[in-house]
């Protein structure tokens, strides 16, 4: 498994938090300690760390699953804390899944007061919320990224029930 550098402005994990999560997933303590030194690095420093340590970690499927479940539950709790209970009761499974996918991959969606948040809080028409999902397809301010564009279209389609 490759180490992934996040460019998000989300809360960064400390080296100690990363180390503990890796150990909990079954990574040897010495390897976890070395891998955790990449926590908090940005830009060139993060890139250099990944290049220098790309062969440090070989996660098993079970370890990857453990790390994913831990992160997913953290993201789910963040998401559930953002809106009132009625908002979630009024969502169907596809809508919840689409928004969780967006949140898991785009933390700023939930951390800032965004158009999609306002649309969700106002219980707007699903087509309006789907249109808001599609707006999260850019790198930087203006550049549409084809992979993000495809992902957001898929999430918007799922939000609308997969029938679009």
Image (cartoon, grey):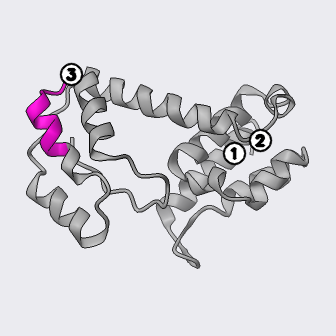
Asked if marks 3 and 2 touch (Cβ < 8 Å), the reply is: no
If you read the primary sequence from the N terminus, does the residue marked by circle 1 or circle 3 appear first? 3
Magenta residues, start to end? 26-35
**Labelled disc at residue 160:** 2
Q: Residues within 10 Å of mark 3 (few under 14, many from 20)?
A: some
Q: Residues within 10 Å of mark 2 (few under 14, many from 20)?
A: some
**In this picture, is 144 found above or below 62?**
below
Percent x, y of residue 127? 84, 51
| Left or right: 123 in relation to 45 | right
Query: Percent from the top left, x then y, of residue 42?
Result: 31, 65
Location of residue 144 in the rendering, given as x and y in whole percent from the top left corner: 55, 72
Front one among 150 and 43: 43
Q: Secondary structure at mark 2?
A: loop
Q: Residue at x 41, y 62 (%)?
A: 7
Task: Check if mark 1's residue and mark 2's residue have beta carbons within 8 Å.
Answer: yes
Taking the image as shown, residue 135 lies to the left or right of residue 104, namely: right
Q: Secondary structure at mark 3?
A: loop
Q: Nearer the viewer, residue 103 or 155?
A: 103
For residue 27, above or below residue 116: above
Marks 3 and 2 sit apart, C-alpha to C-alpha, by: 39 Å
- Residue at the spot 68% in from the left edge and 33% down from the top edge: 80
Instruction: Report the residue marked by disc 3.
Output: 26
What quarter of the picture does the N terminus occupy?
A: top left
In this figure, which residue is indicated by the disc labeled 1? 157
Observer able to see residue 61: no
């Amino acid at each position: 498994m490759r180490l992934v550098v996040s460019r998000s402005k989300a809360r960064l994990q400390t080296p100690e938090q990363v180390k503990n999560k890796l150990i909990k997933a079954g990574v040897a303590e010495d390897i976890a300690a070395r891998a955790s030194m990449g926590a908090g690095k940005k830009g060139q420093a993060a890139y250099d760390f990944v290049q220098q340590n790309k062969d440090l970690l070989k996660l098993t499927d079970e370890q990857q699953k453990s790390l994913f479940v831990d992160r997913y539950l953290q993201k789910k709790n963040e998401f559930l804390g953002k809106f009132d209970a009625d908002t979630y009761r009024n969502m169907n499974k596809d809508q919840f899944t689409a928004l969780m996918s967006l949140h898991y991959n785009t933390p700023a969606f939930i951390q800032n007061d965004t158009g999609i948040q306002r649309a969700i809080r106002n219980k707007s028409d699903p087509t309006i919320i789907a249109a808001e999902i599609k707006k999260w397809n850019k790198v930087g301010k203006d550049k549409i990224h084809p992979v993000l564009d495809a992902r957001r279209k898929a999430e918007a389609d799922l939000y609308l029930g997969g029938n679009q």
